[in-house]
Amino acid sequence: MQQTEWAPKIGAVAGLAIAGILMAIGCVTVVTDPPGRILTGIAAIGLIAFGFGSWRARPRLAITGDALVYRGWFRTQTLRRPDITLIRITEFRRIGRKTRLLEIETGADRLIVLSRWDLGTEPLTVLDALTDAGFAGR
């Protein structure tokens, strides 16, 4: 049976939140200079917020019957087959390594870009599953 839901890895999201909490504790107890406290506090809040948002958006992409469900940090969007214009992989080199992104274009001139972090797996695997489900390659 093929996978129908993709989300960030639970361990990675929990690790982000724990790192943010530890950084916040360090900000309050270890850092003594005011600019350092401000910068460390902002970084801690950012890590905690990113961990919370990534947890809240699970699963990031899911196949449900004849629609795709995309969850963001603040809202969930259901994409029916007629709404989807194009699904493709964009590949580029960055800092000496190859990065792939899954792009979903909708008829409302909206572009959804999902990375390996968002999907929890290689975007090519997700594209294969979407193609088998009839969403891509039309």
Image (spheres, rainbow, N blue to C red):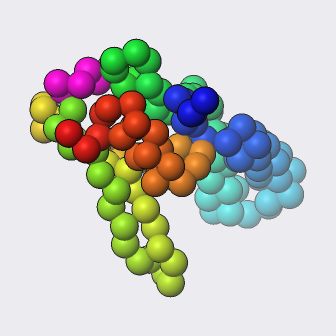
**Where residue 83 appears, x then y in whole percent?**
18, 26
9 displayed left or right of 128: right
- Which quadrant of the rendered structure holds the N terminus? top right
Which portion, as a residue range, is magenta?
78-83
Q: Residue at x 54, y 54 (%)?
A: 122
26 displayed left or right of 58: right
82 displayed left or right of 56: left
Residue located farthest toward the bottom when viewing the structure as drawn = 96
Q: Is residue 81 magenta?
A: yes
Regarding residue 53, the answer to whether it shows in the image is no
Q: Nearer the viewer, residue 135 or 39?
A: 135
Residue located farthest toward the top when viewing the structure as drawn = 65
Q: Number of labelled discs?
A: 0
Q: Nearer the viewer, residue 91 or 45?
A: 91
**In the rendered image, the vertical position of residue 22 relative to residue 130, given as above or below:** below
Residue located farthest toward the right when viewing the structure as drawn = 29
**In the rendered image, the vertical position of residue 36 relative to residue 81, given as above or below:** below
- Which quadrant of the rendered structure holds the C terminus? top left
Q: Residue at x 46, y 39 (%)?
A: 129
When asked about the image quadrant of residue 56, the answer is: top right
Q: Residue at x 47, y 74 (%)?
A: 98
**Where residue 109 appears, x then y in whole percent?**
13, 38
Q: Residue at x 62, y 58 (%)?
A: 39
Q: Nearer the viewer, residue 21 or 59?
A: 59
Regarding residue 96, the answer to whether it shows in the image is yes
When asked about the image quadrant of residue 130, the answer is: top left
**In the rendered image, the vertical position of residue 90 relative to residue 104, given as above or below:** below
**Where residue 102 appears, x then y in whole percent?**
38, 50
Q: Is residue 97 magenta?
A: no
